Image: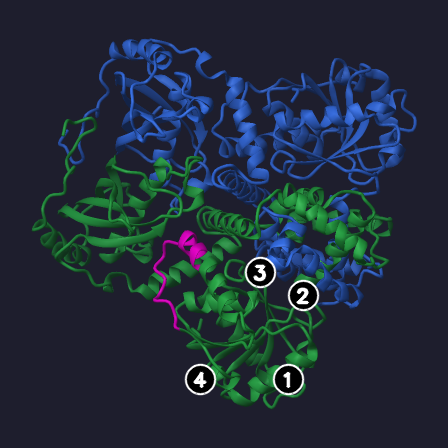
Chain colours: A green, B blue
Amino acid sequence: MTMISKAACIGGGVIGGGWIARFLLAGIDVDVYDPHPEATRIVGEVLANAEKAYAMLTGAPLPPRGKLAFRETLEQAVAGADWIQESVPERLDLKRKVLTQIDAAAGPDALIGSSTSGLLPTDLQRDMRYPERLFVAHPYNPVYLLPLVEIVGGEKTSTETIQAAMERLPPIGMKGVHIAKEIEAFVGDRLLEALWREALWLIKDDICTVETLDDVIRYSFGLRWAQMGLFQTYRIAGGEAGMRHFLAQFGPALQWNWTKLMDVVDLDDALVEKIGQQSDEQADGLSIRELERIRDENLVGILQTLKGSHDGKGWGAGKLLKEFEQGLWAAAGGGKKLWDAGQPLRLIETKVSPAWVDYNGHMTEHRYLQVFGDTSDALLRLIGVDFAYVERGHSYYTVETHIRHLAEAKLGRAIHSTCQVLSADEKRLRVFHTIYDTATGEAIATGEHMLLHVDAKAGKAAPAPEEVLSKIRPIAEAHEKLPVPEGAGRHVGQKR
Amino acid sequence: MTMISKAACIGGGVIGGGWIARFLLAGIDVDVYDPHPEATRIVGEVLANAEKAYAMLTGAPLPPRGKLAFRETLEQAVAGADWIQESVPERLDLKRKVLTQIDAAAGPDALIGSSTSGLLPTDLQRDMRYPERLFVAHPYNPVYLLPLVEIVGGEKTSTETIQAAMERLPPIGMKGVHIAKEIEAFVGDRLLEALWREALWLIKDDICTVETLDDVIRYSFGLRWAQMGLFQTYRIAGGEAGMRHFLAQFGPALQWNWTKLMDVVDLDDALVEKIGQQSDEQADGLSIRELERIRDENLVGILQTLKGSHDGKGWGAGKLLKEFEQGLWAAAGGGKKLWDAGQPLRLIETKVSPAWVDYNGHMTEHRYLQVFGDTSDALLRLIGVDFAYVERGHSYYTVETHIRHLAEAKLGRAIHSTCQVLSADEKRLRVFHTIYDTATGEAIATGEHMLLHVDAKAGKAAPAPEEVLSKIRPIAEAHEKLPVPEGAGRHVGQKR
């Protein structure tokens, strides 16, 4: 895996803005060229949504955000960039012109990706001097949450370019899939276009409304496809009889009149108006902004669910998220992180996600313990108890916890946690965490925890090795000099 | 909403088995007729999967499972049933014969649904004496988790039948959508068939493999469609410019060569073998059983995520789940539940879900508090502090918690919780919960909690009303006679 060092984005609409957000949040500087008068506003809005979504998506330490600069000319934007992403409107003549201009201004080793959703890379690269570094990198909206990028090469694209492009996507949280042969609309939009054309017929012929059609999708195969695709779903449906046997059953249906796609629908004014009206009714008063927020919150929750899937190994887009986070933790350097001896450690920064609140908009009880648990995990990484350490068979387990609720953590509030080590010996580690409202500085909850160092295989307490103790000792010694926090040592119901 | 009182299932394969599970788990007795020698085994397997899934899906109190009986004849099975579901193989002559036989044996008011995925209800009802009560009720696999049922009437189906069918689905956790006009394959399978035919071309033409195609779906639009469908997604993508403007942009693409669907793919032996081989590679050694388990766990997690969406109001399939659970709680009768004064209350029964464990297969720290929180909620419902009570502006908030971890809760283990009331006065309620491994009886964790009765609007403690106190008092008095549980009143790190 290789990290992009500087990115340039030519075109900053909704798609370009999504790419910009992916780069910036991965710590990569981005230069943008877009002559559109509203480009700054649009990119700003996409970036704000992306930051909100990332704050909910992951508790892993994001690197410092990359620097964003809008440039006066295309040439200024591409200078020094090693990944240049073109996201201008979908017209071959325009894209060809812009790509040729990028080609002339960019360093010869720069990778040039096009966001086109349908044009052939061979057509796009026709007039380029170094056509071998041009490829299609087709993302999906919202680009900052949906990980897919279809990577498609043209006749002149080099194998090295494809490989380099594929390698640079996981560090920005994205999944490249290499499409073996170029065809118009590639794979994703081919599938979408087929389903879309059929959907238009169903609306035009009054078989159902757009709301019913959407419900048919999201109460059935949409739930399947968030985690397994078409073929794997059918593999399971086929059961023990096997995929080949199952496919044989499909044969007859292909001859049946189960689609109108032998004919093209006419998307005339009447059909546009019909869909428009039905879509207004379906929205039921929710604005685009509200729908966008609900969509993003749902996507975040689904991605987090898939991260915990397959016995914690992660599945599909959730596995990708897990690996992305592991990269972030590794990059943050675990035990190399600096700390200030004069105060408790500041460890977790997050936001109260919609998945965490009850219908009152208050954070649910057990989510407090989740933040306290994450705080303990962050402390453990700081003293060298990281993924690798745990995999070698030792860990710290929490054996006892005391929580006080002092105020409410409300939906969307930025919160952070601190940790004061109360005592540490060979086996035991007693810590006191506090969750604060970051804006007001108010303490929202405290958590006191006793952790035991264990031999996980033997299933019993064991002394921590010197490599760990040598890291916890200076923190414990520094924290001993701090005042004992109010509430430490309390039992439930104790008088103040 | 009306509850089915007795169901009959004619045909007990994977789809019939799914219906059987839906009915039984909603507390409805089911009589089954299926002459297939393996019917009992297949239904048993589907039912086992469904029970596992439900145990993870919801903590709401399921009613006692309905009684399952396999009958010797179709006539015996349908006797006394008010919903009869036909799920025999997809051949018009066979279905017509079976439906006519059901029609002759069933009471005249019974609803008769067919699971057909493509045949027209008008064709199915042709020979029936009471054709007005025949409709298509087309579900999606796995039927016990995907909520969608397409309800389609034929020429002779009555409006009352459609309405009665739609009303009977939410109490079994399903979502009926009424398809306005009958066409072959209805709506869902039309959309699927269009996408499927295009997918077959993409594989046949070597544009990509089945694994790549599945990845394209599940890393992009599959994530969208679990929560919003096609049109609402495009509404958002269109942004402020509006749906009509956005649609106008689609016009040209309809004329482009973006699909091969003007032609039908030949699913010949070579293509079947190619897909079979690629599917084997994609499965990467996972058996159908393992894939099934992963699929179900993912679906459970996605449904739970959507239940918390839209500021806790629920969204799409998650909103349906939320309403289903509210129905279960209401049916369980809240404060009317009996309790035994001689021991702690037994309140929560659940299983350690895969979404709850870390990669060691141990339940994650904060999930213990989730079970304790659910236990407190169950106690509160028992004393009349239910949804309606909270909506009127008062509630109990947890202010302090003490947890001890005594053993590990492992993946898939059945666990239950008990509650002993330690003390109760006008405002305060101090409780002691224990989580047990249900099979071994071993105590896994204890939680001591102080709850305060609050006026939620004023945001401060307030005395509970007599209607609540009168219910908590007898429990508190009975529990005072029990021994004080070991560990009550402990602070973190206290010597034993």
- Name which residue type carries label 2: Cys
Residue A167: where, in percent of width, then height? Answer: 49, 71
Q: Is residue A100 left or right of residue A47?
A: right
Subunit that carries the residue with mark 1: A
Q: Is residue A345 left or right of residue B215?
A: left
* Residue at the spot of label 4: A80
Residue B237: where, in percent of width, then height? Answer: 61, 58
Instruction: Tell whether label 4 touches label 3 (CB within 8 Å).
Output: no
A151 to A416, vertically: above or below: below
> What range of the chain is rendered magenta?
A51-67
Between B123 and A312, the one nearer to me in the picture: B123
Residue B10 visible (yes or no)? no
Instruction: Tell whether label 1 touches label 2 (CB within 8 Å).
Output: no
> Tag 4: Cα neighbours inside 10 Å, few (<14), some, or many (≥20)?
some
* Residue at the spot of label 2: B208
* Closer to the eye: label 2 or 1: 1
Q: Is residue A387 left or right of residue B484?
A: right
* Residue at the spot of label 3: A141
Nearer-N-terminus badge (3/4): 4
B256 to A349, vertically: above or below: below
Residue A237: where, in percent of width, then height? Answer: 68, 43
* Closer to the eye: label 3 or 2: 3
Nearer-N-terminus badge (4/1): 4
Asked whether B22 falls inside the magenta stretch, the response is no
* Closer to the eye: label 4 or 2: 4
Secondary-structure class at tag 2: loop
Nearer-N-terminus badge (1/3): 1
Kindly identify the residue that appears in the image at 52 percent across and 20 percent down.
B330
* Residue at the spot of label 1: A97
Does label 3 lie on the same chain as label 1?
Answer: yes
